[in-house]
Image: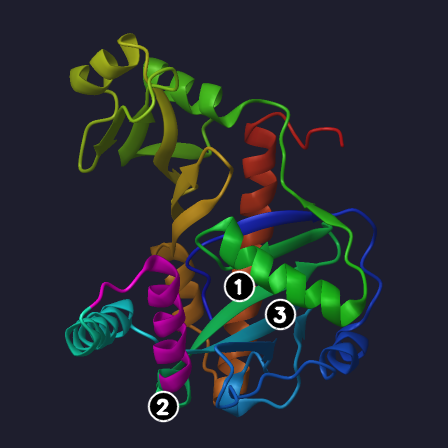
Amino acid sequence: MWFRNLQIYLLSTPFELSAEALHDKLTARPSRECSSMELSTYGWQPPLGLNGKLLTHAVAHCTMICMRREERVMPAVVVNQRLTQRISDLEEAEGRKVRRRERGEIKDEIFLDMLPKAFTKSVLTYAYIDSRNGWLLVDAASPKRAEELITLLRETLGTLPLRPLEVTDSPVHAMTSWLQHARLPKEFVLGDECELRDLAEEGSVVRCRRQDLAGKEIAGHLKAGKEVVQVSLEWQARIGFVLTAELGVKRLRFLDLIQEAAAESEAADPATRFDVDFALMSLELGRFVSSLIKLFGGVAKA
C-alpha cells in the first residue's frame, strides 16, 4: 500500500463526494478480465484487494482508490519471428517479394491470431484524494501512467477538474542553485545522485550515483553550463525521494522513523493494517507535499 512514486495534481474545485458516494460512482466501471479479442481493460477494484469489497477506503479527509489494468502480453519478438517465417515461406512458395503493405496485413493477421491465446497480466495503480488540501496523489512513476487513472476517473464521474502541480519558482533553476551553493532549506538534505543536462545542447546528459553532489566533479559540470533536472533528497529524515524537473517524485521511501511507527501498531487483520498504514502515509505525505510546494514559492497562479 505504501506509495513508491508520486504524481501530484491540484483539484480546481472542492471534491464534495463522500467515500460512500464515490464508491457508488465507481461501481459503474468495475475491473474485469479481457475478452478473447481485447488487448486491455481498465476498471476499479477494492484498494484492499481480496480483503475488501468497497471500491474506496477512507481515513479522515483522504480517500484511496485503485485502478486495475488487465492486458494481454504480446511479446514483439514472438510476433516478429512468426512474421519473418511466414514472409519467408510466402516468398519462397510464390517466387516474389512481399511488399510493405502486404507485410503489415500479414502482421495484423498474426496479431489477431495470437491475441485470444495470449497470457494476461494485471497492473494496479493506487491514488488517493485529499479533499482538505485539494489534491489527487497518484502512485505512478510517470505522468502517462497517472493520466490513465485520471482518464478513467473522469469517465466514471463525468467530470474531474484538476491540473498538474505547477509552482512559482522554476524547479530546474532551484535544483541547480542547490548544487551550486550546497545549500537547501533546513527541512531538506541533498542525497547522492542527480541528473544534469545541457539544455542548449540536445543529448548532453550526465547521470551520477553515489556521488558527492557538493564535490568538484559536479561543480565542473555546472560551470560548463549544465542544469539539474533530477536530484535525490531527504525530507526531515522521514522521506527519501528523487525529484524531477516536472515535480514528479520517484523512488519514494518512508524512512526508519515512519516504519518504526507503523511497526508499533498491533493490527489484527489486513484491513486494520491497511487502515493504519494509510493513516500514517497520508499524514506524512500531507506534510511533505506542503513543504515541497513551499520549497518552490507556492502554487503558481492558474
Lower position in the chain sequence, tag 2 or tag 3: 3
Q: Secondary structure at mark 2?
A: helix
Report the Cα–Cα distance between label 2 and label 3: 34 Å
Q: Bounds of the magenta span?
A: 96-113
Q: Which residue is tagged 1?
A: 280
Q: Residue furthest top?
A: 223
Q: Secondary structure at mark 1?
A: helix
Relative side of 91 to 198, left or right: left
Quadrant in the picture for residue 85: bottom left
Name which residue lies at 38% across and 45% down: 241
Name which residue lies at 57% across and 62% down: 148
Percent x, y of residue 175: 42, 24
Foreground pick, 83 / 194: 83
Q: Which residue is tagged 3?
A: 64
Quadrant of the rendering where the C terminus is positioned: top right
Per the picture, the main secondary structure of the magenta-coloured stretch is helix
Q: Which residue is tagged 2?
A: 117
Name which residue lies at 78% across and 52% down: 161
Tag 1–tag 3 contact (CB < 8 Å) = no
Alpha-carbon neighbours of circle 1 within 10 Å: few (<14), some, or many (≥20)? some
Q: How many marks?
A: 3
Q: Decide: is 32 above or below 96.
A: below
Foreground pick, 25 / 269: 25
